Amino acid sequence: MYKNMKKTSLIVAITVSVCITIFATMAFTSKSAEKKVSFKQITAIESVVPGGLGRSRIITTDLSGSKLEETKLENFYSLVGINFSNIMQNDLTITSKLAELSNQGWELTNVSVGVESGVEKTGLFITRYLFRKTE
């Protein structure tokens, strides 16, 4: 009987040791194989200059900072005032750009907005979209 208890204790000790070794190996392996994270930011600048004289764009810079891509947006105002079809067109252009980046594996992580008011009846709406990609 003492031999059986000794044999059972030995089997339990070996099983526990194997489980601990497997668990520790998995824990350290996942930490050592950390993935690379990249970030990308795009900025939508929408002009509120009367008469449609402002410049509205989506600005995208590549990860190295050496290439700038501009996508034209419509101004909020035309000669007769606020132009809702321009705003609708901007919404379509911006959501199309967001979908394109999402399809490339970029995850939208943050959106920040701001308003710049210059001289009377001028200004900008600025929206920044921060994306993250894990490789």
Image: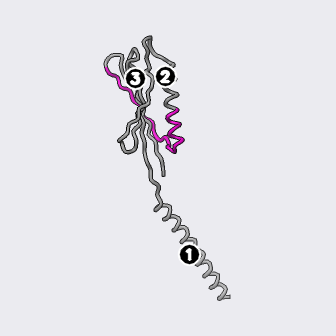
Q: Residue at x 58, y 74 (%)?
A: 16
Give the residues drawn in magenta, as a range. 96-118
Q: Is residue 105 left or right of residue 78?
A: right
Q: Amino acid at mark 3?
A: Ser
Residue at left offset 43%, top offset 21%: 75
* Label disc, if present, on residue 135 of the rendered structure: none
Residue 100: give x, y in percent of width and height.
52, 38
Instruction: Locate residue 4, reporting x and y percent.
Output: 67, 86
Left or right side of 46 for 103: right
The numbered mark at residue 87 is 2
Marks 2 and 3, the one that precedes in the sequence: 3
Label 1 SS: helix
Query: Residue flagged by tag 2: what amino acid is it?
Result: Ile
Frontmost of labels 3 and 1 is 3
Is 111 part of what is drawn in magenta? yes
Q: Is residue 117 above or below residue 134?
A: above
Extreme residue toward the top, this view:
80
Amino acid beneath label 1: Ser
Mark 2 falls on what kind of element? helix
Secondary structure beneath label 3: strand
Q: Are marks 3 and 1 in contact (CB under 8 Å)?
A: no
What is the C-alpha distance between the residues marked 3 and 1?
67 Å
Label 2 to label 3, Cα distance in Å? 11 Å
Q: Residue shown at 44%/40% (left/top)?
A: 130
Q: For the point 36% across and 22% down, which residue is it?
A: 123
Q: Residues within 10 Å of mark 3 (few under 14, many from 20)?
A: many
Above-or-below relation of 3 to 63: below
Q: Label 3 belongs to which residue?
A: 47
Q: Position of residue 7 (x, y in %)?
A: 64, 84
Q: Which mark is residue 17?
A: 1
- First reached walking from the N terminus: tag 1 or tag 2: 1
Residue 124 x %, y % = 38, 24
